[in-house]
Image: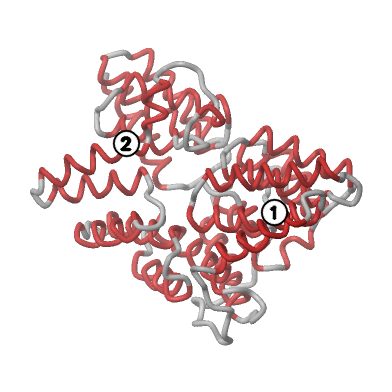
Amino acid sequence: MKSFAYLALIAVGVGSVIIVWPRRTEAASPAAVPHRPYDSALAAHEVNFNLARVRRDPGGAIGWRQLASAYLTEARQKEDPKLAIKAQQAAERSLSIRKARNAGAAILIADALLEQHRFEEAHQACETALAIEPGADAAERTMTDIDFELGRYDEAGQRIAAHPDWRKDPAGMALMARQAETYGHPDQAEMWLTQAVQTADADYELPATTVSWFHVKLGELQTRYGRYDQANKQLKQALALYPESWKALAAMARLCAKRRDNDGVLWYGKQLDEVAPMTDVVGLMEDAARTKGDESDADLYAKYVLKLNQSTIDLGVKPHTPAQLKNGHTHDRMFCLYLAEHGKMLDLAQHAATHELASRKDIYSYDTYAWVTFLWGKAKGSRIDVVEAKQSIDKALATGTKDPQILAHAKAIDDYLQNN
């Protein structure tokens, strides 16, 4: 799951806070003003420009910080954790040169670590930023995002309650939507995201890449809750704004899978592969090819999934951290679900789910652990494992979420226990 640090505007809610209702609006309208268009060469140009700058002045903290920011932008566009590591290293260099009035470098370290799914370390980097500049808004927002990713909903709620202004901007509206969905209010979530899209569309200062992100978030929500026509509209608008958006391409492939549009899955999956291949989407391509009777292609996609996750496979069931993986971070959640649902390497799938839950205890990690443990236990005929899956899915449901996937997993586990 990608963090909202992508926009550097973070706000999440918790069960103890009152859900704030957005103003009801109609479906988002097309952009009313022009936005700075996406330039595929710009991010690399910024990296090269700032590399030249630090070569001329290796002792300049600002230059290293700017280089870190450029690397991070490119990492997010390409979903490339190796670039995120470079961003982290450049920001660390900046901070080592000067700490005073350089909280921004610590925040960039946190953002780069978030890209690598190194959440606890990112949290520590935020603490460093706040020690340098107490109350720094960007650090508070990023720390809130990390708490949400880790399932620390109480801590996140305390921070959002202290910053009501966060809900006034589009990114804040998107995060209020996340809060609403987490606590079982998808209709409120859709209203918040619709409002965010409309606000972003009307803000000419926002670049097209950022505006596209809001359309993706609305389209993803609508996909989850079966509003496929509306989702299709939003995701196509996202791609019109940002044709190389891996987020939008992946979301379109997932939408096509929901609609049983196998050709669409394959088309968008191939487009995505040119930008940033994703484990779950390649798995959907395997399923689509098999459904179409293209067994040879399906087998190739199956091998590709394993190739994308070779570092995790090499480590096997040994304990590991994101930093130990050659690609810089884990895709354990996607990979273990793929393995479990395809009946492959179930011991590794179970380990990956266990590792994921050990590192982050949000509702989606509990759901993943529950589902993988259920399928593993069912395959072994182990009721003990299925009971453990039931305990985990109950934790996933604890916020009152109405997420259809979590509810479907809960029903399957309950049905099995009742009948066996």
Q: Dot 1, crowdedness within 10 Å: few (<14), some or many (≥20)? A: many
At 73% from the left and 67% from the top, the residue drawn is 168
Q: Nearer the viewer, residue 354 or 163?
A: 354
For residue 153, the mark is none
**Type of amino acid under label 1:** Ala
Residue 163 x %, y %: 81, 55
Residue 286 x %, y %: 22, 45
Q: Which residue is mark 1?
A: 11
Q: Quadrant of the C terminus?
A: top left
Q: Which residue is mark 2?
A: 307
Q: CA distance from mark 2 to mark 1?
A: 36 Å
Q: Nearer the viewer, residue 299 or 148?
A: 299
Q: Earlier in the sequence, mark 2 or mark 1?
A: 1
Q: Is residue 254 left or right of residue 319?
A: left
Instruction: Residue at the far left: name it.
Output: 293
Q: Dot 2, crowdedness within 10 Å: few (<14), some or many (≥20)? A: few
The kind of secondary structure element at disc 1 is loop
Residue 121 x %, y %: 68, 33
Q: Nearer the viewer, residue 332 or 362?
A: 332
What is the quadrant of residue 266 in the picture?
A: bottom left
Residue 155 x %, y %: 74, 39
The kind of secondary structure element at disc 2 is helix
Q: Nearer the viewer, residue 326 or 255?
A: 326
**Type of amino acid under label 2:** Lys
Q: Tell which tag, 2 or 1, sits nearer the viewer.
A: 2
